[in-house]
Amino acid sequence: MGDGRGTVAGVVEALLVGGPHQAVADVVRARLRLVPEGARALAAAEASPKDPQARAQLSLAVEHLLASDQAFAGYLATTALGRPADPPTVHLRTDPGTVQLRTGPPTTPPKGPSTVQLRVDPVETARAQALAARRGATPIVVALVLVLLAALVAIGIHLGSRPLLKPGGPGLAHAAPLSDPALVQGVLPGPGAMPGGWQVRRAPRSGTGTDGDVPCLLPDSCEQQLAYATVSFSAADIQTVEFGVVTFASAEAAARAFDTTLDRTAGEDSGAVALPRIGDQSAVRTRGSSSAVALVRVGGVVILVHDDGPGAAVTASWLTVFARLLAERARQAQDGRTPDAAANTP
């Protein structure tokens, strides 16, 4: 198969036993460890490589990885581990001045029309051998590069604060969606991430899908809405801010939810609010002079920041601070990091 899914058994064998495809297996191993389910299945199988149940779970994890990540499956299909093995039916043997081509297993003696002999010029043979020696170094270089990539992922090296092979980055993978309500709740800021004077007004709440506080933001595809979390803070009982985080199965679904939510959000698109560009998409709606709502999309996450208080819709200073704070924490979570961004005073 061209998507790399026809070689799950070979991938599992390489992961647990090793062999000539160890460099590619190391890349698969590193990619599995980026997903909690894959990491658990891999650890169990490595602890008991002969356990049929552990192998079956690892096979399911590999199959799920390749089915859910077409980019990585396509990469695997380009490797020797991901391609079906060619039938061992063609054999080439060279003698001085002679090339013999025959079909059948190596132990089968050549007979009848299955054997072809070609006489070659010794000078051309030497040239061909030199060329083959130069080309033979290419697989070694490729293998070394793959091992280096796997090692960088394993020790958590980031480029520009993003993992080298993060799900969602170009090339090998897509961002793993945030479907665990506990992880989504971790995107919300705690008191320590808020500026001085802000106290929790309503405790954090989270859930899956469209249960509880958050309705379906994709009426035609509610199943793509994965989880949500909300919390609110207040300052001196005159200003409040409410944070909402909703996660989706893909960035495309989140983009559609952003547009739908923006259309449904009551208020005006006021030019008086100088909200800078934040995340992948951002917009603001105002309600009179004391209420403003910022809507931001970061990858597969849509965030809402509702600021109420004197002048909230005029200067939008706190709105900008809080929207940037939540967008940065959403980005950290999607990068596989524990969100630790804190607000800066406007």
Image (tube, rainbow, N blue to C red):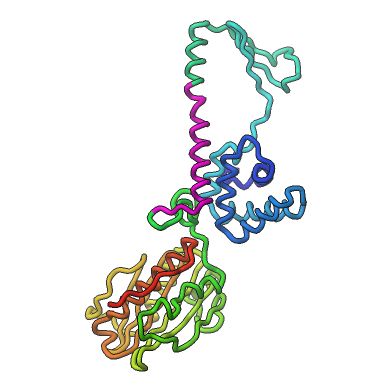
Q: Is residue 86 visible?
A: yes
- The stretch of residues the image draws in magenta is 134-159
Q: Is residue 259 visible?
A: no
Image coords of residue 259 (percent x, y): 39, 72
Above-or-below relation of 47 to 344: above
Question: What residue is at 52 percent from the left and 46 percent from the top?
Answer: 151
Q: Does the magenta stretch include residue 146?
A: yes
Q: Quadrant of residue 235?
A: bottom left
The x and y percentages for residue 179 are 55, 69
319 versus 44 height, above or below = below
272 left or right of 4 in image = left
- The quarter of the image holding the C terminus is bottom left
Image vertical order of residue 17 relative to residue 104, above or below: below
- Compared with 89, 280 (above or below) is below
Looking at this view, name the residue that lies furthest to the left.
272
Give the image quarter of residue 69: bottom right
Q: Which of 140 and 289 is in front in this view?
A: 140
Tell me which residue sits at (66%, 47%) in the image. Answer: 8
Q: Which residue is drawn at 46% across and 61% down?
A: 335
Magenta highlight on residue 123: no
Residue placed at 62% from the left, 34% from the top?
A: 20
Residue 329: image quadrant is: bottom left
Residue 10 in the image: state x and y as whole percent.
67, 42
Q: Residue 223: percent from the left, percent from the top?
A: 56, 71
